[in-house]
Amino acid sequence: MKTSTELARYLQQITGQAPALGEMDPGDAAALPLFLRSAYRLVRATLFGRSFVLAMAHDGQDHATPTEFTKHVDLLRAAVQGEVALVLPRLQAHVRNRLVRQGVPFIVPGRQMFLPFLAVDLREREPRAIREHPGVLTAPAQAILLGHLLGKVVEHRPLNEIATEFGYSAMTLTKVADELAAKGLCEVVREGKTRRMTFTAAGRNLWEKALPSLGTPVRARHWIRRLVPGGWGKVVAGLTALERYTSIADDRVPTFALWRNRVRGGTDRGELDVDDGPDDAEAAVEFWTYDPARLANGNCVDRLSLYLSLRDTADERVRKELAALLEGIEW
């Protein structure tokens, strides 16, 4: 989450006036339910002579549904007896649209803002992942690297063959090779017109070397109202997958992973019926930046991608199982 200083800078940039921000007295929020006190840090703000409260979401607490966010704001307003705006690190387009329709104030610092009691800024400022996280590999590069670590034949193989196996173009694999070489993770060897990769480390050593450059494959997460039997390929992910690998208990609603490139087609064919929350949902579906089926262990996402998808969680029981998840890999 952005700091109060960065948030103030963004508000001044958009409104032209510097806000006054101050930490809220913990006693003022004593009436709040415990789950809200653990999910948000409350900050008093004054702008254009209007006072309101900023509910700054803690890391990992920004994945609520529009209905849940609306309930959060209602409870916060009642507790502080004033206007409240959510401050979130990111916001999916469909969630943003629902919040606007329901009049729920929010700020995504550096990207967009909706404060109906002050001003509105809904400009899309979603940078490409490689720009947002300069040190993180692109999705194709990460998929190829993880495929190699998981035992797929990548090293010393012509790039066009690797492209075919992973569902990418030959041009994409050329960029992948250059990207991995720039990170010092591989060397590119030319044999006439053929290019091949040779990795600079092996097994666990390569994983540790690459880890700072690896990001979560999950781009978005949605509740699915119904699943069509025999429809899109179901690869379990999230806690459903973690239960397969460790002793943790799964959630009531199973989680599946799907390559985001297939999302539109699945929705158009009626295979994916998106819901707003878990109450009537049959499943949760994570939309991945690369195809989870290409690296899957049977009908379960691979251990390395699963680790990356869960490592930033605030759930202590999940964090305790991540070490066991990696111990099961034969490097």
Image (cartoon, grey):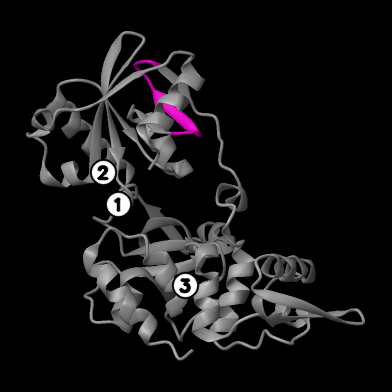
**Which quarter of the rendered picture does the N terminus lie within?**
top left
| Disc 1 element | loop
Which residue, as the protein is rendered here, is positioned at the far right?
A: 192
Mark toward the viewer: 3 or 2? 3
User: Is 109 drawn above or below residue 68 in the view shown?
Assistant: above
Counting residues from the start of the chain, the first of labels 1 and 3 encountered is 1
The residue singled out by tag 1 in the image is 277
- CA separation in Å, label 1 and label 3: 25 Å
Which stretch appears magenta?
109-118
Amino acid at the residue labelled 1: Gly
Mark toward the viewer: 1 or 3? 3
The residue singled out by tag 3 in the image is 305
From the top left corner, tell me how far across and down residue 316 is, in percent.
23, 64
| Disc 3 element | helix
Counting residues from the start of the chain, the first of labels 3 and 2 encountered is 2
Amino acid at the residue labelled 3: Ser
From the top left corner, tell me how far across and down residue 154 is, in percent.
67, 84
Q: Is residue 297 magenta?
A: no
- Is 109 positioned to the left or the right of 173 in the image? left
The residue singled out by tag 2 in the image is 68
Proximity of marks 2 and 1: CB atoms separated by less than 8 Å: yes
